[in-house]
Image (cartoon, rainbow, N blue to C red):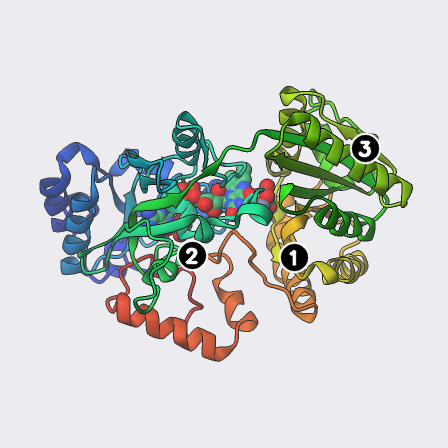
Amino acid sequence: MTGSADERRGGMASPASHPLLAALRTAIGQEFVLAGGDLPAFELDWRQRCRGKALAVARPADTAQVAEIMRICARHGVGVVPQGGNTGLVGGSVPDDSGSEILLSTLRMSKIRQVDTANLTLTAEAGCVLQSVQDAAMRHGLLFPLSLGAEGSCTIGGNLATNAGGTQVLRYGNARELCLGLEVVTAGGEIWSGLTGLRKDNTGYDLRDLFIGSEGTLGIITAATLKLFPQPAAVTTAMAGCGSLDAAVRLLELARIRTGPALTGFEAMNAASLALVAKHFPQLRQPLPAMPWIVLVELSDVEGEAHARDALEALLGEAIEGGLAADAAVAENLAQAHHMWHLRESITLAQAQEGFHIKHDVALPASRLTAFCADADALLARAFPQARVVNFGHLGDGNLHYNVQAPAGGDSAEWVRRHEEDVTGAVYDTVAAHGGSISAEHGIGAIKRARLARHKHPLEIALMRSLKQALDPGNLLNPGRLLPPPI
Ligand code: FAD
Ligand code: 2HG
Ligand code: ZN
């Protein structure tokens, strides 16, 4: 390609002197518009897979400033990429490489505006870190159940924009189901105040649910009213070793029947996942000997410790007797329970330390999980015999992270570059054959948008494009993410 970056952007002014930056500095303060050397930390995603180049980073303090930023960017026709904790796994929170987008960081917007204990709701600004929302609920003796490995740095705005899932979905639902109201800044810089906290409101189209999961492409979420729950009287956790995925799925079915709404977590990890954790975090003792699958079961109980423990032990006893599990370990105390969860949540980090790999965040009906894995495993074993399938996830939701790690010992980046297209094609075709989804909880972002066209009905894509056109006619909000490229 010839010509300078500025020429490719259509003769725009150089970044430092861009008239938009002067307007942004006047609107939100000189020190909150970052440029030059301050940008790289915001331009690279958590996986270190997507690196872009922003014109500047704007760090608004409140909703009015977000609205002003949007009005300025709309006047200049400049795209805006919202960014919360930047823990997204699909490349949606970093700019493209044009150097022409504004990155809007919500991290300064971190106030808990209200806790309404009578209504069991909490209103938080978009930049609140998830853990701080959980802690605020806890201070009032209540529970905000959204829980994921990145909870120490992801934000509530990002959680809602991606409709995040995590480890408590089978009991409490995903981010969408935990949200009662939103405040949103539109592409044109208007503010929609929808923080009603109502549990019933049938007054037309559900705009809240439209913005949730839209990954910053329809509006910027600036605050949310969230559902709170009573804290359970006791939580008990156990791990069980299963000889096959089929046994793990049948144990899930048994757990649902025996424990009903007390079942708050049911995770599964194949042997390769825990082997990677053992390799990279050898200090983390594994409570059970290696098995083809280990499941982590959590019960939350309103009646208390002894009742919860009895229920869990009875379940695991029945599972062992019925041949669904070979072995089980029940956590004796909170520290042991945390340790079990820590093992589970270390898989993502262990995979990152092992090298580059290909993520597939897929959902299937529980009844198709075993057949899907058998087919996908067989396909990959034939075509890529050295690749390692690191398969784990939220079995209770039918959500597997069917990740493919590059062969041990080689150049993992090069292997992923060469084979990603074919590996992902094979996995997603198998997902489709079993009636599944190619994104259970991480979203589409920049990485999966080209795939979406193949896995969604053309009418769905057309309707999604109509919504985008209606809400963001200038294509300013996270352009080039989520929607497939035009054909
Ligand atoms: P970002 O990464 O900053 O942004 C994500 C997307 O949302 C981008 O498209 C961005 O433009 C948009 N966005 C951000 N803020 C706003 C806003 N205020 N308004 C509009 N759009 C916005 N995800 C799960 O679902 N379940 C898991 O169990 C899980 N575990 C994880 C574990 C680890 C170790 C890591 C690194 C990630 C994990 N994730 C998981 C993925 C990630 O944490 C979630 O997608 C999370 O919801 C992203 O929040 P964030 O604030 O970091 O958003
Ligand atoms: C999890 O469940 C996250 O731990 C991350 O969704 C999954 O690393 C992954 O692929
Ligand atoms: Zn997950």
- Residue 137: percent from left, percent from top: 41, 32
> In which quarter of the view is residue 41 placed?
top left
Could you say which is closer to the camera, residue 216 or residue 143?
143
- Residue 239: percent from left, percent from top: 75, 34
Secondary structure of residue under mark 2: loop
Residue receiving disc 3: 328
Residue receiving disc 1: 419
Give the left or right position of residue 12, taking residue 448 as reference. left
Query: How many neighbours does mark 1 have within 10 angstroms: few (below 14), some (14-19), or many (20 or more)?
Result: some
Q: Is residue 155 above or below residue 369?
A: above
- Residue 127: percent from left, percent from top: 32, 39
Query: How many neighbours does mark 2 have within 10 angstroms: few (below 14), some (14-19), or many (20 or more)?
Result: many
Secondary structure of residue under mark 3: strand
**Residues under labels 2 and 1: Cα distance?**
29 Å
Give the left or right position of residue 197, taking residue 66 as reference. right
- For marks 1 and 3 on the same chain, the one whose residue lies earlier in the sequence: 3
Amino acid type, callout 1 = His
Secondary structure of residue under mark 1: helix
Residue receiving disc 2: 213
**Residues under labels 3 and 2: Cα distance?**
37 Å
Q: Quadrant of the C terminus?
A: bottom left
Q: In this rendering, which labeled residue sits more in front, label 1 or label 3?
A: 3
Amino acid type, callout 2 = Gly
Could you say which is closer to the camera, residue 253 or residue 482?
253
Q: Quadrant of the N terminus?
A: bottom left
